[in-house]
Amino acid sequence: MAHNSKGSASEAYITGIGQSEVGVRVERSALGLTMDAIKQAVADAGLTFDQIDGVATYPGRMAGFLGFSPIGADEVIEVCGIKARWHMGGGELPAQLSAIAEAAMAVKTGQARHVIVFRTVYEAAALSRPDEFPALRRETVDGASQWTAPFYAISAATWVAQYASRHMKRYGMTREQLAQIALNANRNALLNPNARNITKKPLTLDEYMEARLISTPFCLYDCDRFSDAATAVIVSAGDTLDEVKATPIRIAATAGKVDRYSWDQAEWVAAYATGPDLWAKTDYTPKDVDTVQFYDGFAFFPITWLEGLGFCKVGEGHEFIEGGTRIARDGELPLNTAGGQLGAGRLHGFGFAYEAVAQLRKEAGERQIPGDPKVAVATSGGGPLAAALLLARD
């Protein structure tokens, strides 16, 4: 049955969501995972591929880094037989969820009516099959890596850890407080069927504190892990909602920020500039938000989003999460209710949009937050790039 409400042509809605199997070193192909997620999302919206006229992804197919991004918009258009009026796929965006923001702008301006937006990651499988996915080897570095690779900061863990260490020195954050992000993710992931291959047993504070350090102050449980999966959403124009069967979730505002990558003197990660920009575009305030789905490639990132979006003062994020009760599923501000990337796999940002929609529709099963949630924030990115979506069930 079609959804009865008729939205404004100047609005954009997420009308369908889909997610493939999430695993580590899966046998299914990257394209197979992508199609699993896309078919779910299209069916969830109650649409057919004949009605889809746009495709967007981040960052597009990367031939030199296929594990990171093996599937592009062109392949989806070809395989699905889509007659696309608009499509895009590129990494030169504020961050991953900016692909959804781009799709929202496309439908608001009449470039398309229904857009598939997807993100596929295949990093664990690629590492396990080096013959199929050879490592990229170069004699020189350029682009963003020129600012980090010469200093052996190959992994983001090494430079994000510096921001976290500064928070400890300047504001007094402790590892016991930081641990609440990972412990909360673990508890929620145990209730998420899609996280079964990632989180299999409870995590205790003692286990966290005793885990090996990766880059001080981050231990093993503060870092997301490579996984293989695809996540997709359908973004639809507001005047097409009579074609849709699922509860539409309005994209109330979007914001993004890209800083210079020559970051040696950077004072703050990009979440701090993105937060005020998001609220400047809407009448909603942090007090209206029922749940937050914050990018947690490293456990420190959700703290930066709490502060950057104004849920607490700068320098007080670690106090906000202390003890874990405020960010629990039944707490004041439920955080990463599917387990985030720490608990449910590195879906590279798109899992947060998926979960926000599921919670606002009240379709999250065992992990559903109580009450009648109507507003959520989903974010992606950290360090010099960041993106945020404000989502609302009208």
Image (spheres, rainbow, N blue to C red):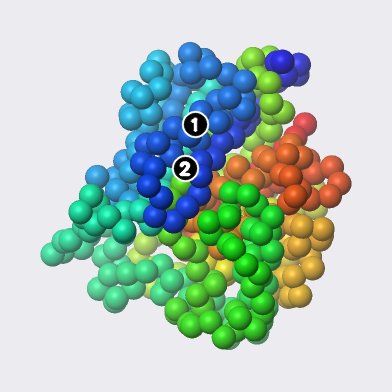
Residue placed under numbered mark 1 in the picture? 38
Q: Which residue shows up at 47% across the image and 37% down it? A: 118
Image position, residue 379 (x, y; %): 58, 51
Q: Amino acid at mark 1?
A: Ile
- In this view, the residue in front, 33 or 224, is 33
Please, is residue 123 above or below residue 162 in the view? Answer: above
Q: Which residue shows up at 79% across the image and 65% down it? A: 326
Q: CA distance from mark 2 to mark 1?
A: 8 Å
Q: Decide if residue 394 is on the left or right side of residue 353.
A: right
Marks 2 and 1 in Cβ contact (< 8 Å): yes
Please count the marks in the image.
Answer: 2
Image position, residue 314 (x, y; %): 66, 70
Q: Which residue shows up at 65% across the image and 52% down it? A: 192
Please, is residue 1 above or below residue 201 in the view? Answer: above
Q: Quadrant of the C terminus?
A: top right
- In this view, the residue in front, 65 or 174, is 65
Residue placed under numbered mark 2 in the picture? 230
Q: Amino acid at mark 2?
A: Ala
Q: In which quarter of the view is residue 238 placed?
A: top right
- In this view, the residue in front, 57 or 93, is 57
- Of callouts 2 and 1, the N-terminal one: 1
Q: Which residue shows up at 62% across the image and 67% down it? A: 201
Image position, residue 311 (x, y; %): 73, 60
Q: Is residue 250 visible?
A: yes
Image position, residue 11 (x, y; %): 64, 26
Characterize the local packing of mark 2: few (<14), some (14-19) or many (20 or more) Cα atoms within 10 angstroms.
many
SS under mark 2 = strand
Characterize the local packing of mark 1: few (<14), some (14-19) or many (20 or more) Cα atoms within 10 angstroms.
many
Q: Is residue 117 visible?
A: no
Q: Quadrant of the N terminus?
A: top right
SS under mark 1 = helix
